[in-house]
Image (cartoon, rainbow, N blue to C red):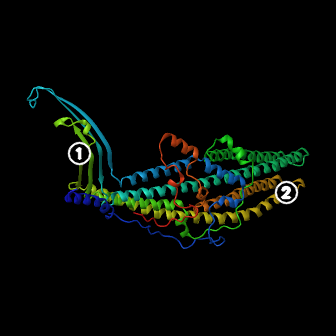
Amino acid sequence: MPRQRRRVLVAFSALPALALAGCMVGPNFTRPETDVAGHYQNAANLQTGPVNEALWWENFRDPTLSNLIQAGYENNLSLQVAGARVLQARAQLAAAVGELYPQQQGAFGAYTYERQSQAAPTNFKGADTYLNVAELGFTATWELDFWGKFRRAIQANDAAFLGSIDAYDAALVTLTADIATSYVSIRTLQAQIQVAGTNITVQTESLRIANAQYHAGQTSLLDVEQAQTQLGTTEATLPTLRAQLGVQEDALAVLLGTTQDKIAPLLAGSGAIPQAPAGVAVGIPKDLLRQRPDVREAELAAASQSALIGVAKAQLFPALSLSGTFGWESSSSNGASLGDLFNWSSRAITLGPSVQIPLFNYGQLTNQVRAQDAAFEQSILTYQNIVLQAQQQVQDAITNYVQAQQSVAALTGAVQSAVQATNLAMIRYVDGAADYTTVLTAEQAQLQVQNSLAIAQGNVPQALVALYTGLGGGWQIADGHDVLPDRIKADMARRTNWGGLLAPPAHAAPASRAQQIRQTYVPNW
């Protein structure tokens, strides 16, 4: 090979290495500054040590609740949509990585038969002229990533992929909380229905006594009518409570990915309102930055948008490409034959660089950079706002939890007094020492305070569920499991060739998600 040709080939072979070693324009992402409180308010009665919020529903020691959450994890359709988005983001990342290689490539082949007319000006002999031409080869065009346009795109898609995993985890946090909230609401409504039923029994007995007193001539018909009014008013609360119970059961069915007729067996009849555990730890606000998947998702969204600034900025610089064609070409002219196609002497090689320099873009490229920078600033502000909202959610839940416990303590004593007052009022009424208004007032107070206690008892676990949700617990149930059931992945594999991307190692986080603490996103490019 001539020395000059070798020098050309060496120079061309060095271009890819030079491109990969080139700079990457655009900013390198770092975690935005956030305003994080040093501790939570009104948390004197709560622990500040390590938080065990992973499978928080097990702290209630309610097998029915645990079974419902497991069923929701396995069947909830919205969660499966989030799992499909993870696979979508993984495929988009793979497509972005492919841009590092020759963007246009392919094999070509052609055969041409030509018969020249006898009347053609170039046909001097006036004889038939035939020509057969065949060619076969490969061609490729490679835009070198000298300014980091493709590497920045990979960073953006990589952050979007990791963000989709956190979005899946965030969907799990919401799902577990919604199931628990719906379940506690169902048990609370069942308790209210039981309270109403107990008071109906008491008031029915009061009506019987009022009737007996009236027929004995000891009281007037007014007492009977008042007793009947009170009983009817209490009975009228049952249809409303049962309607609310049905709505909650219907909502729970959707969360579990099933129909309403299958909920009753899952609830296993009526049950007590879940009891909050004795000790609850909340940690410190700074823990939210690594515990809550929605906070991590917002951070990765900002990282992805930061990389897109580099993608847009790279458009301002010259684009260096390398194009080449290698193949064989033969024809039947000049005594040659198509059979010579694969002779080494029939090879044809085209190789050379090209450059495109943006000149007159009328500010379009510059304004695209500005637009991406503005979008990046939005993502930073969104991240900072989510951090503040996360602290607010935890703080509100702490306040509600503490206040709900105090309400239960106060109402528990009030219920005992109300029941005793109703009994004493009835005794005085039978003895003629008091009129029926005293009984009526006592029964109304008993119903009200017992119903308030049932609601307050439900508010305690509701507030605790909100607290665990605010702390970012619940997504750990998926640790060690794939984002989609095997049956769904089997359907996808039958429709489309997914290669190895459907295998869990191809789209799972690089470490056990229950143990992994995601730090600031540092691109590895």
Q: Residue at x 23, y 45 (%)?
A: 345
Q: Is residue 354 left or right of residue 494?
A: left
- x and y percent of residue 485 in the render? 58, 47
- What is the three-letter code of the residue carrying label 2? Asn
Q: Identify residue for label 2.
A: 423
Q: The C terminus lies in which quarter of the figure?
A: bottom left
User: Any mark on residue 337, and which?
Assistant: none
- x and y percent of residue 372 in the render? 35, 58
- What is the three-letter code of the residue carrying label 1? Ser
- 48 w.r.t. 478: above or below: below
Q: Residue at x 50, y 54 (%)?
A: 506
Q: Is residue 483 left or right of residue 460?
A: left
Q: Identify residue for label 1.
A: 345
Spot the residue most to the right.
216
Q: Quadrant of residue 478?
A: bottom right
The answer to whether residue 167 is visible is no
- x and y percent of residue 276 in the render? 70, 62
Assign a secondary structure to mark 2.
helix
Q: Is residue 435 left or right of residue 280?
A: right
| Closer-to-camera residue (312/443) | 312
**Residue depth check, mark 2 versus mark 1: number of the one nearer the observer:** 1
- 278 w.r.t. 208: above or below: below
Q: Residues within 10 Å of mark 1 (few under 14, many from 20)?
A: few
Numbered label tally: 2
The answer to whether residue 212 is visible is yes
Assign a secondary structure to mark 1.
helix
- 106 w.r.t. 160: above or below: above
Q: Earlier in the sequence, mark 2 or mark 1?
A: 1
| Closer-to-camera residue (511/361) | 511
| Closer-to-camera residue (140/302) | 140
Mark pair 2, 1: CA separation? 114 Å
